[in-house]
Image: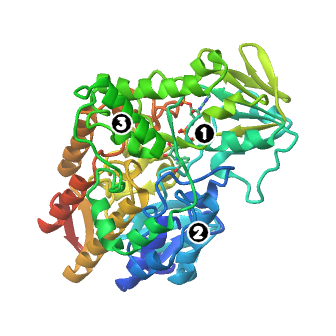
Amino acid sequence: MSGDSHPRYDAVIVGAGFAGLYMLHRLRQAGFQAVVFEAGSGVGGTWYWNRYPGARCDVESMEYSYSFSDDLQQEWEWTERYAGQPEILRYANHVADRFDLERDIVFDTRVVKAHFDEAGAKWDIETDTGRTVAAKFCVLATGCLSSANLPDFEGLTSFRGETYHTGRWPHEGVDFEGKRVGIIGTGSSAIQAIPVIAAEARHLTVFQRTPNYSIPARNAPIDPDLVADIKGEYPAFRARNYKEPAGFGSKIPKNDQSALQDAEANRERNYWQRWERGGFGFLSAYNDLIVNRDANDTAADFVRRRIRETVDDPATAELLCPDNVIGCKRPCLDTGYFETYNRPNVDLVDVRTNPIDRITPAGIVVAGQEYAVDCIVFATGFDAMTGTMLRIDIRGRGGLSLTDKWSAGPVTYLGLTTSGFPNLFMISGPGSPSVLTNMITSIEQHVAWIADCMGHLRSHGFAAIEATPGAEDDWVAHVNAVADQTLYPTCNSWYLGKNIPGKPQVFMPLIGFPPYVEKCDAVVANGYEGFELRSAGA
Ligand code: N01
């Protein structure tokens, strides 16, 4: 690709989710010319695609929103403690309108190639609609959970009924009334969808490979007093959240004590209070739940007892009881999930002991038995964190492909850049806290860092910035060392790539938001330490 005769921008941004929208806004404010390419027909990213029944955020509404505009955060009114997908999508559209973003977004257009032209110090970018543009910078705002994972089940294409993936849900919705539905998977998406589908369908069969812990969300109409309190001091509230390990939850009561040092009766009371409050605060009950297996067992055991108490049929309850570490796979929040198994129209099928054999024209076969269904919902997750980037043919200096560079797992500096790929930025990339935080908080921090970096290059006359291999190696070692101090690497989670056959198994996100922010700030304060800044022609 030459790109020389094609439109030339300061930056191409890939994706118009929360990351791409804010990146565009920030770059415009800084006087850069940017264009966004978006595969969907509208803004919203994750919230544009994931329209399955029951889809809802599990970070509370007053926190899962942009902080960059005080007018925006003061004026927007959330209706529930946790916003549902339609409301979050309305919010994304409101932001796009309010800041007049759509005029620089090209919809229904997927970036398929991004090649770095060393001589021209620019990225040549090609889309699936045949557009070619050039830009000094390329920003991947592609989302951590945007490449749907559809396992390669034998016979899948022979199925006569409809199939759906939670992450690619039809915009017009699906009518399950009178239908026999099969759902494969019991992750966050399924745990939200199952109670809603069960209430509508004639029959629901859940195919479960790994049982999951889930904490009640206790969703409710938003408390107007809480809204007034937060809006009375929104910037200070955001600043407190910024200091939290996951960038949210400053209102959750903390307890800097080991679970093993508390008396059993106190511990039980503590877990109960948090269970009743609902939400992620359950996992903040003690300071060692994610680092000490014995401590973790006390919380895991509490949840297993709640499952056994809730689910009437003892055999189903046992199947639903997880035996791994609580919190090392992404924790789930639910509304009536375990209760759903008491409905007469819901069955649970274990596909851990006997994996799904195949799909037939009429249903799903496990251990030689066919479960007849009219439609199948694949709640089978995503090729997380790297999948979407690697589906683009990205080539850096010397034609090095990102796929080759990351063949043993993603390698980045700060989760923002990767050496060999000058002027290429990732928002919430592997090696950054991203999926272990409130995504919008992480996105805002990355966008600000990237926009400031571009401003620095412009004002100092640099043509390119690139991570040094040494800084990158040290960073990868750091991300692994932090993970190895915890129980996170012990589960078959998508954090490790274990959900995708053949994917290299590396713990991808960095644990701990505040130290990460300090590191990013220190890198800048030390003159972009760990990066090489090049002048034109150098
Ligand atoms: O996907 P998942 P998800 N045969 O990967 C199973 C975010 N999110 O879409 O665990 C049988 O968690 C798989 O089984 P196993 C959140 O970060 C947020 O539910 O690999 N089963 C698992 O049960 C979340 O973590 C929100 O053994 C197969 C399921 O499919 C992330 O998105 C809501 C299989 C996939 O679970 C992804 O969640 C929703 C096979 N071949 C999602 N392959 C909120 O904010 C896979 N499975 C609330």
The residue carrying mark 2 has its beta carbon less than 8 Å from ligand 1: no
User: Looking at the image, which residue is at 57% across and 64% down?
Assistant: 88
Disc 1 to disc 2, C-alpha distance: 26 Å
- Residue 120 can be seen, yes or no: no
Q: What residue would you read off at disc 3?
A: 270
| Image location (x, y in percent) of residue 456 | 23, 76
Q: Position of residue 5 (x, y in %)?
A: 50, 80
Residue 368 drawn above or below residue 223: above
State if disc 2 and disc 3 touch (CB < 8 Å). Answer: no
Q: Which is nearer the eye, 117 or 451?
A: 451
The answer to whether the residue labelled 1 contacts the one labelled 3, judged by CB atoms less than 8 Å apart, is no
Asked if the residue under mark 2 is in contact with the one under mark 1, i.e. CB atoms within 8 Å, the reply is no
Residue beneath the point at 49% across and 31% down: 502
Q: Earlier in the sequence, mark 1 or mark 3?
A: 1
Q: Earlier in the sequence, mark 3 or mark 2?
A: 2
Q: State the image quarter where residue 285 is shown.
A: top left
Quarter occupied by the C terminus: bottom left
Q: What secondary structure is found at the residue carrying circle 3?
A: helix
In the displayed structure, would residue 217 be above or below residue 363? below
Mark 3 nearby-residue class (10 Å; few <14, some 14–19, many ≥20): some
Q: Quadrant of ligand 1?
A: top right
Q: CA distance from mark 3 to mark 2?
A: 41 Å
Q: Secondary structure at mark 2?
A: loop
Looking at the image, residue 446 sits to the left or right of residue 529; the answer is right
Residue denoted by label 1: 191
User: Label 2, on which residue?
Assistant: 43
**Type of amino acid at the residue the image marks with label 1:** Ile
> Identity of the amino acid at label 2?
Val
Beta carbon of the mark 1 residue lies under 8 A of ligand 1: yes
Circle 1 SS class: helix
Locate residue 514: give its quadrant: bottom left
Q: What is the spatial separation of the Cα atoms under label 1 and label 3, in whole angstroms?
A: 25 Å
